[in-house]
Amino acid sequence: MMHGSAKKIGYIVVMGLVFMLLFSACRKNSHLADLVQYIAQLKKRETVSNQPAEKIAVPAPVVYSAAPLRAPFGQTATGEKTTVMSKEAEANPLLAYSLSMLRFMGTLSHGRNMVAFILAPDNKVYEVKIGDEMGDTKGKVIHIESDRIDIKEPNGITTTLKLKDEH
């Protein structure tokens, strides 16, 4: 059992060690020396001069005028009414879509007469035969086979729609 004075001495020794540890943390540590040196270098650097910034060329404004363009809805600049689909396209919905938007689905034949079935973006299947027009360029169906349909466009180019395998 420790006596009162021995306890006091032990307490003083422990407190002394604690103070020594605290004060040793406050002294200049070697691991902070590189940070202090870096900050000193930054302070010595020359500051950026206050020269005016480089002038940036401003592009000339572009004036936009939609007056000469066709209005997609309502009235044109000349006052005529426009519709989303032409009257021909209303009679033949396949004229409202480009050929790339149409999908050849198959054929049906009865003797020498063959018809093709075309799926349009409106998710409806339309029947076409040789001589029918289709596509927004009004191409004419010139040939139908069981796996393809040929359409001759007014510009002379023949486009072929092929039957796609769904597997």
Image (cartoon, rainbow, N blue to C red):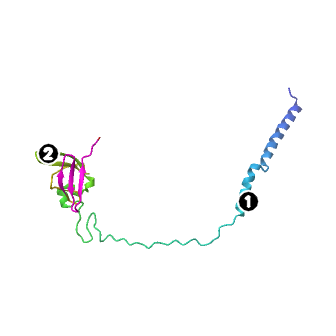
Which three-letter amino acid code belongs to the residue tagged 2?
Answer: Ser
Give the residue furthest to the right: 5
In the picture, the quarter occupied by the C terminus is top left
Give the residue furthest to the top: 1
Q: How many angstroms separate mark 2 from mark 1 (CA)? A: 92 Å
**Residue at the disc numbered 1:** 40
Q: Is residue 144 magenta?
A: yes
Residues drawn in magenta? 140-166
**Residue at the disc numbered 2:** 109
Residue drawn at x 74%, y 55% as measured from the top left: 36
User: As rendered, which of 98 and 66 lies closer to the eye?
Assistant: 98
As displayed, is residue 53 above or below residue 8? below
Mark 2 neighbour class, 10 Å CA radius: few under 14, some 14 to 19, many 20 or more: few
Q: Is residue 42 magenta?
A: no
Decide if residue 19 is on the left or right side of residue 60: right
Residue drawn at x 65%, y 67% as measured from the top left: 48
Instruction: Please report whichever mark, 2 or 1, sits nearer to the chain's N-terminal start.
Output: 1
Q: Are marks 2 and 1 in contact (CB under 8 Å)?
A: no
Decide if residue 40 is on the left or right side of residue 86: right
Which three-letter amino acid code belongs to the residue tagged 1?
Answer: Ala
Q: Position of residue 99 (x, y in %)?
A: 25, 55
